[in-house]
Image: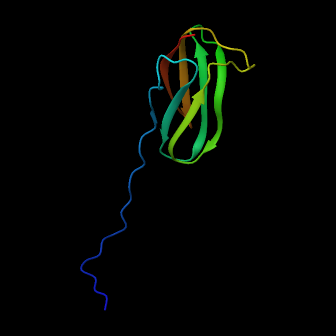
């Protein structure tokens, strides 16, 4: 037969934290991968900006389920042209939270 040794109330596990990892490789040429962890289902955008603050590319713009995700950037701008060598910033916005990091493109 089946025996129960003890019972507990339902256990809830708190959601993990939103996390944006450093892109790899960095510096990069011709492409790099950006990984991130989502604690819950939410709208996600990942954008790339140059040092003057102009948006170069939007890599992700959609609702995503929780978990670890990855997206690649091949150094091209939103119109398909190649971005020049230099320092760039990538920003993850998930729900109401944003995290930014730096990356270097070497041509």
Residue 79 falls in which quadrant of the image?
Answer: top right
List the single residue furthest toward the right.
79
Q: Is residue 96 above or below residue 24?
A: below
**Residue 59 picture location, percent across and down:** 64, 29
From the image, which quarter does the C terminus lie in?
Answer: top right
Which residue does the image show at 54% across and 22% down from the upper left? 90
Q: Is residue 27 left or right of residue 11?
A: right
- Image quarter of the N terminus: bottom left
Residue drawn at the location 58% of the way across and 43% of the way down: 42
Which x, y percent locates residue 87? 52, 11
Q: Nearer the viewer, residue 25 or 100?
A: 25
Decide which of 61, 96 is in the foreground and name it: 61
Which residue lies at the image location 46% right of the left edge and 19% below the top edge? 26
Rendered position, 103 above or below 63: above
Position of residue 23 measured from the top left corner of the image (x, y, whole percent) = 48, 26
- Compared with residue 77, is residue 98 higher up or lower down, i.e. above or below? below
**Coloured how?**
rainbow
């Amino acid at each position: 037969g089946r025996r129960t040794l003890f019972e507990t109330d339902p256990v809830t596990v708190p959601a993990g934290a939103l996390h944006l990892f450093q892109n790899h490789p960095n510096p990069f040429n011709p492409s790099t991968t950006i990984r991130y962890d989502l604690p819950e289902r939410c709208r996600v955008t990942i954008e790339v900006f140059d040092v003057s603050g102009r948006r170069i590319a939007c890599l992700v713009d959609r609702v995503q389920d929780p978990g670890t995700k990855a997206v690649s950037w091949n150094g091209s701008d939103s119109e398909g042209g190649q971005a020049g060598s230099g320092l760039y910033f990538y920003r993850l916005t998930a729900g109401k939270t944003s995290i930014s990091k730096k990356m270097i493109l070497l041509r």
